[in-house]
Amino acid sequence: MLERVIKTVKSVLDIDEEAVLTADMGPDDIDEWDSFGLIALFAAIEKEYQVKFSYEEMIQIGCIGDIVTILEQKELA
Amino acid sequence: MYGQYDNIRMAGITASVPKHVINNENLIPIYGEKVVKKQIKATGIVERHCAMDGQNTLDLCYFAANRLLDALKWSREEVRLVIFVSAHPVFAAPANAFYLQRRLGIGTNCIAFDINLACSGFVVGMETIGAFLQSYPEGTKALLMVGATPNAGLDEEDQGTAPLFGDGCGAAAFEVKKGHHMYFSQYSDGNQMEYLYRRPGEAPHMNGMGLFNFAIKEVSDSINDFFKHFETTRDEVACFFLHQAQKFMFDKVMEFCDLPEDKCPITYDHFGNTASASIPITMSYYHDAIDYKKRVKIFLCAFGGGLSWGNVLLDTEDILVLPVEYTDERLEMEECLC
């Protein structure tokens, strides 16, 4: 799941494929992760994973790992 | 805060916007292609109409209101209340409503004043008119003019605000008429004013994520609470006119409030966020979306700086909705006011 989410993050935020991203990285570490970037990311992940984020889930997301956690919870639900 | 008025109707509405269009891809030389394409994808805002050569909020309000009063065939002497709502006034004093009264030829038997509000301005202006006219007799008429021309003051280098805002104004006419209903809810939160503020002569300061969280939580909750409080279902509403802030915010409000997509028209793609004018522009742009001659319910929701947010449900019936006018015209400012 983590690898797939990182691939989505790179694609949506237009980050070089060779760049190294890890689960703990978020807006402080990734320049492209600004407010527009985050909104584009929400939209792309909802589309790709066929999920809908609630308000509570959206405000939880502070790093790539948080996206993975929420998607895993949704998969289990 | 909830309110209900049982004797007021919207008689007509229209909007005027500048002819000049700025495509957001024009910002590629400043921000780069990657950034601009990401912004367009996130916000859905492809282009915006922008005032040029000194055209200002009062010019656009005048053209919208003048056209509306002519089409309604209202005598200018009959208008008893003139309200101008904007965060982009031209005069610091007196109220800009006086200038519009003067140029529109509205008689002295009226009250004119301004309200300083941005995106929530149309709904707050409507409630002000509704409350104000309660003690006036059947047929008393009021004029609400709203809008903004923020582009002249935007910093093109500011990626957070420059691609979002469009210029435009709206005018709406109201009259006291028994048996017509308007239902309101209104909220204000000055504790979060830092999310969007501007000092005179400065570009706006905006916290995009703060506003986004506000819109999807507080605004969505207010819409859901509204329908519960007034015991109304979404099915009873013919059309939902939501503030056109940007795509993802708009989509999330629709989703969290169970609003049907086919009843929520969008104009942010071609006009951007036009602050208090966004509802009049959307109603005018989709002037044939519903049959305004019939009596149906429409729902309006506006939210923005302050923070300020509100909702209104109203009856239609013989509302004159004129198409959007595109104009680069300016009013010649009289020498005595220069």
Image (tube, grey):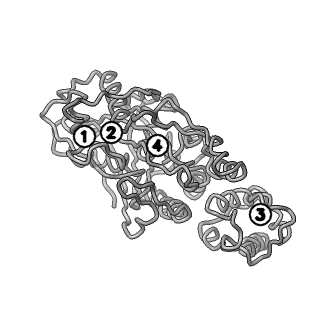
User: In this figure, what is the number of numbered marks?
Assistant: 4
**Helix, strand or loop under label 2:** strand
Q: Position of residue A7 (x, y in %)?
A: 83, 64
Is the residue at mark 1 from the same chain as the one at mark 2?
Answer: yes
The residue pinned by badge 1 equals B97
Is the residue at mark 2 from the same chain as the one at mark 4?
Answer: yes
For label 3, the crowd category at 10 Å Cα-Cα, with few meaning under 14, some 14 to 19 and many 20 or more, is many
Estimate the spatial distance between the alpha carbons at disc 3 and disc 4, rounded to whole Å: 32 Å
Q: Quadrant of the C terminus of chain B?
A: top left
Q: Nearer the viewer, residue A2 or B287?
A: A2
Q: Chain of mark 4?
A: B
Do the numbered discs 1 and 2 sit on residues whose CB atoms are within 8 Å? yes
Name the amino acid, label 3.
Val
Q: Nearer the viewer, residue B110 or B92?
A: B92
B87, above or below B211, in the image? above
The residue pinned by badge 4 equals B278
Judge depth for marks 3 and 4 and give the one in front.
3
Label placed on residue B145 = 2
The residue pinned by badge 3 equals A9
Estimate the spatial distance between the alpha carbons at disc 3 and disc 2, rounded to whole Å: 44 Å
Estimate the spatial distance between the alpha carbons at disc 1 and disc 2, rounded to whole Å: 8 Å
Of labels 2 and 4, earlier in sequence is 2
Estimate the spatial distance between the alpha carbons at disc 2 and disc 4, rounded to whole Å: 12 Å
For label 1, the crowd category at 10 Å Cα-Cα, with few meaning under 14, some 14 to 19 and many 20 or more, is many
**Helix, strand or loop under label 1:** helix
Is the residue at mark 1 from the same chain as the one at mark 4?
Answer: yes
Estimate the spatial distance between the alpha carbons at disc 1 and disc 4, rounded to whole Å: 20 Å
Q: Position of residue B48 (x, y in %)?
A: 54, 39
**Helix, strand or loop under label 3:** helix
In the image, taking residue A34 as reference, residue B316 lies left or right, namely left
* Residue positioned 65% across, 59% down in the render: A39
